Every structure is written in C-alpha cells, then in structure tokens.
Image (spheres, rainbow, N blue to C red):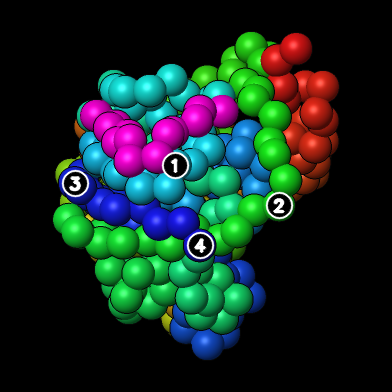
Amino acid sequence: MAVIEVLSPGLLTTVQDLGRHGYGHLGVSPSGAADPVALRLGNRLVGNPESAAALEMTLAGGRFRFPDGAVVALAGADFEGPPLWTTLEVGPEQTLSVGAARSGARCYLCVRGGIAAPLFLGSASTQLACGLGGLHGRRLRRGDLLETAAAQGPVASRALSSRVLAYLAPSKTLRVTRGPEWESFDASSREAFLATPYRVAPDSDRAGLRLEGAPLAMRAPGGMITEGVDLGTILAPPSGQPIILFVEQQTTGGYPRIGVVASVDLFRVGQLRPGDEVRFRLVSLEEAVRLIREQEQLLASEEFLFAD
C-alpha cells in the first residue's frame, strides 16, 4: 500500500465516503461526504468506485506529501491550488498544496485506490461528534499517515465536461417539500419561509446549518412528541430560527418540521458557508422524485460527464 503524509491538515479535513445509511434506528447518523456528488465524480476521475473514501477539506485545504506518487483529482468547491475536476499525476516525493476556498465550502481530494480506513457499520466516514470511523474518529493532524488501497491497472486522464460543470454551478435556492408539520405553522411564517432569504449562521457545522432570518411560528403553542428525523429536515426550534439537519444530524427530534430539502439539492447544502444567503422553493413530492431521478441519469452518463 502507498501512503499519504499530512504536512498541514488545513482548517478541517476528515476521511469521508458516501456514509453509513440505514442505522438511524440505532441512533447513528449517516455522516459521509457533505457534497456526495463531488465525491462521486472525483472518484470516477481517478478510476475508483464512486463510494471510495477520500479527504474532505472544509474552507481551507492542506499540504500532503506522496512518497510513492499517486493519481489524484480535486472535486467540489473552488479552492486555490491545482485545477479542479481533472485527473492529476503526483510524482514520488512530491507535495500537493491546496489553499483557501474562493467560493463554496468543501473540496475533496480523491486518490486512486481510495483511502484505506477501517470500516465501521460498512463505512469509513468520520463521525466527529461520536469519534467514529476515519482516522481514529477525528480530524486529520500534522504528521498523520494515511494508507491508500491498491488499484488495478492504469487510469485514463480525463476532465469533466462544461455541461456537467454548468449543472454543478452553485445555487443558493434550495428546493424543499412540505414537512410533516407544515400546516401547523401560521400562514405568515409559511409565506416568509418561501419569500425571504435566510443567512447561514457562523455556528453551523456538519450536524446542522443554523439559519438567521424571518422567525417561524406555530398557529397554536405547544410541544410535540419526539420523532425520527431525516437528512435535510428543516426544524423550527423555540427561537423560530430554522435549522437544516445535515450529515451528522441527530436521528430524533421534538421540534416541528416545516420542510425537507429535496435529495437533488442536498449536495448544494454541503457547499453553503457561514454568511451565505439561501432561499427555499416549494416543490411537490412527485417533482422531487423526478428531479433526483434526472440527476442520477445525468451522473450515470459517461458522454455527459467527461470532456472529449
């Protein structure tokens, strides 16, 4: 196995794959890449399975030395450094440096073979709150050594097409479906939720994005029984300021749910950063299903994805 030496870990860098889904009933959140579309495409650029583990860098990249060389790709937000969305070859003993984010929040360093981290419940993803997965369940530190899995055969050098890059362009409008308590909110709150912008608060993280804007209020006061909550659920706590539950979410909650981010836009939630403004657009369940099916069809198309 080859290794990667962490010379500088950046602000927050962790090992992530596509997560450990299906364990919410045990109190285990999915974790995984905050922008799973970027991770999937980065892995395809280096000839990996889409689910291979990679490094997720948040707001600022890091410096990594490759004693044995490697084939890599950077995918996701626009970070300073090597070009994004293309296959890159790093020679033996060379160092790869990734700077700060120019826009967006997260960039993925995908390495041919993938990061060889131990699996917990079938996933190598780091869950910081519980200390699970990844490298000892924590963020990377200077001096860490990461092993990469062996890869079979050569990989062709390629880049994403302009068409898919246009599709992946950042959007600050998130499509949502009605939450279970939608009708319990007063009419002015439902109107404000869809008509006014919300700002991502500084204390947002992988567990949830706290939003600042028009407060949401119920038609009648009173609590509700704690129930299971899903990735992308938008809660309204007593402050009235919404929270989008994200990849390291709690798995149950007792706050009313005004909406749920459509699956097609979850990768865009992963690229929101503190200070960004976001708006919500209501769609039906039928439209949400159609949109995610269309996205999956595009991501399955080699002709759509890669430049000639």
Q: Is residue 219 above or below residue 304?
A: below
Residue 8 numbered mark, or none:
3
Q: CA distance from mark 4 to mark 3?
A: 22 Å
Type of the residue with mark 2: Gln
Q: Residue at x 30, y 36 (%)?
A: 95
Q: CA distance from mark 1 to mark 3?
A: 18 Å
Label 1 residue SS: loop
Label 2 residue SS: loop
Of residue 38 and residue 62, the one placed in the foreground of this image is: 62
Is any atom of residue 249 visible in this view? no
Q: Residue at x 75, y 12 (%)?
A: 308
Image marks 2 and 3: residues in contact by CB distance under 8 Å: no
Q: Earlier in the sequence, mark 4 or mark 2?
A: 4
Q: Earlier in the sequence, mark 4 or mark 3?
A: 4
Q: CA distance from mark 4 to mark 2?
A: 12 Å
Q: Position of residue 39 (x, y in %)?
A: 55, 44
Q: Is residue 89 magenta?
A: yes
Numbered disc in front, either 4 or 3: 4
Image marks 1 and 3: residues in contact by CB distance under 8 Å: no
Q: Position of residue 66 (x, y in %)?
A: 36, 45
Residue that label 4 marks = 1
Crowdedness of circle 1 by 10 Å Cα count: few (<14), some, many (20+)? some
Range drawn in magenta? 87-99
Residue that label 1 marks = 69
Q: Residue at x 46, y 56 (%)?
A: 2
